Image: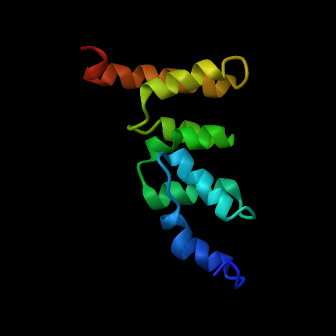
Amino acid sequence: MIKQSRSDEAYQSYGLSAANGTTNLAVYRALIRAYPDRDRRRMLLDMIETRGNKGKWFAAAKDAGFFGVAIECAAVYGADPSTLLRAARNFLGKEEKLTATVALLALSSMQLSERWWV
C-alpha cells in the first residue's frame, strides 16, 4: 500500500497494529522506520491511543524528546517508579521540569505501592 501512494491508509489500517518490538520504545522506533515522513509526535499519540496502557509509554515519549507527553504518561498509574527515578537522574540539570515532575511521581507511586515497602 505504501508503494501505491496509499501511505495514510496503510498507516491507519496496518501500521499502528503491525509495528512490533520487545518494548514500547522498540515498537515506536519500528513505526518511525516504516513511516519516516509522518509527524513523530502524532505517531506516538496514535500508538498510545491504539495500544493503551499510557503509563508504559513513558520511555518512548522521553526518548523521542516529547517531554510533555512523557510527563502525562508518567502521571498515569503503570509507569515504573524505577524508570521514572532513572529518568530524573539522567535529566538532572538538563530538563528541570521533567526531572522534578517524574521524581515526585516516582516517589508518589512508591508510596502507594506495597512492594516498595516490603
User: Is 72 drawn above or below residue 6 in the view shown?
Assistant: above
The quarter of the picture where residue 39 lies is bottom right
Indicate the quadrant containing the N terminus: top left, top right, bottom left or bottom right: bottom right
Image label count: 0
Position of 90 relative to 4 (above/below): above
Q: Seen from this angle, which residue lies furthest bottom?
A: 4
Q: Nearer the viewer, residue 6 or 54?
A: 6
Residue at the (61%, 79%) spot, across then down: 9
* Residue 107 location (% of width, % of height): 43, 19
Q: In percent of the image, x 55 and y 38: which residue is there?
A: 59
Residue in the foreground of this view, choosing between 70 and 33: 33
Residue shown at the point (72%, 17%) measured from the top left: 93
Is residue 37 or residue 4 the one in the foreground? 4
- Quadrant for residue 88, please give it: top right
Q: Position of residue 58 (x, y in %)?
A: 53, 39
Asked if 43 appears above or below 110 in the picture, the reply is below
- Residue placed farthest to the top in the image? 117
Identify the residue at image location x=65%, y=64%.
Answer: 34
Q: Quadrant of residue 111?
A: top left
> What's the image's color scheme?
rainbow
| Residue 71 location (% of width, % of height) | 56, 36
